[in-house]
Image (tube, helix red, strand yellow):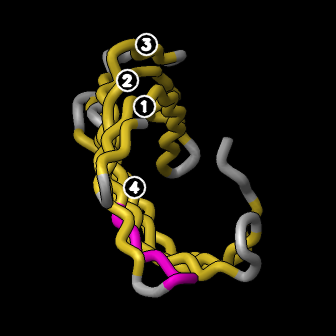
Amino acid sequence: MYRLSYFYIGIITSTVDALINVTGTDLVDAGGAGMGGGIGFLIPVSKRAIFFLDIASVTISKTRNSLTQETSIGARQDIDLGATIDLTKKAFDYMIGYKQRTVTITTDTAYKDEITSTYFGFRWGTFF
């Protein structure tokens, strides 16, 4: 990841596994791997709080399917919007946010899986 002031860009590697089952029949049992990138920004709201937005996209270039039909997995796209509040000066934060992940899988029909979640919790970490 490369950071310039409030903004940053980075390179991402990822895997995707998908099992689509309709009325007891497996329609897709596929997976893949690929690379992509992400951009985002961190904006300090106060000395102890940071607002952030992270957008990432990964193109799945290698796809495998354990079933006989042709399957392709489209780009995985993530959006993460949230804030952190320092509980200690360097290592412990409280986080709250919203995350959305979208993946499109195509066989003879296109399936679109979209996962959205609101999260909150504690994070421990340090920078080297």
Nearer the observer: mark 3 or 4; the answer is 4
Q: Which residue is mark 1?
A: 12
Name the residue type under label 2: Met
The residues bearing labels 3 and 4 have C-alpha atoms spaced at a distance of 27 Å
Neighbours of disc 4 within 10 Å: few (<14), some (14-19), many (20+): some
Q: Residue 128's spot in the image, x, y percent? A: 67, 41
Q: Earlier in the sequence, mark 3 or mark 4?
A: 3
Position of residue 9 in the picture relative to residue 94 (left or right):
left
From this view, report whether residue 23 is shown above or below residue 48: above
**Disc 4 element:** strand
Q: Which residue, given by chain and number where applicable, does mark 3 sit on?
A: 68
Circles 1 and 2 in contact, beta carbons < 8 Å: yes
Eye-nearest disc, 4 or 1: 1
- Identity, as a three-letter code, of the amino acid under mark 3: Thr
Check disc 2 and report the residue beneath it.
35
> Gap in Å between the C-alphas at discs 3 and 1?
30 Å
Is residue 112 shown to the viewer in this render?
no
State the separation of the CA atoms marked 2 and 3: 26 Å
The residue mark sitting in front, 4 or 2, is 2
Q: Residue sitting at 55 percent across and 80 percent down?
A: 96
Query: Which residue matches tag 4?
Result: 101
- Who is closer to the viewer here, 68 or 44? 44
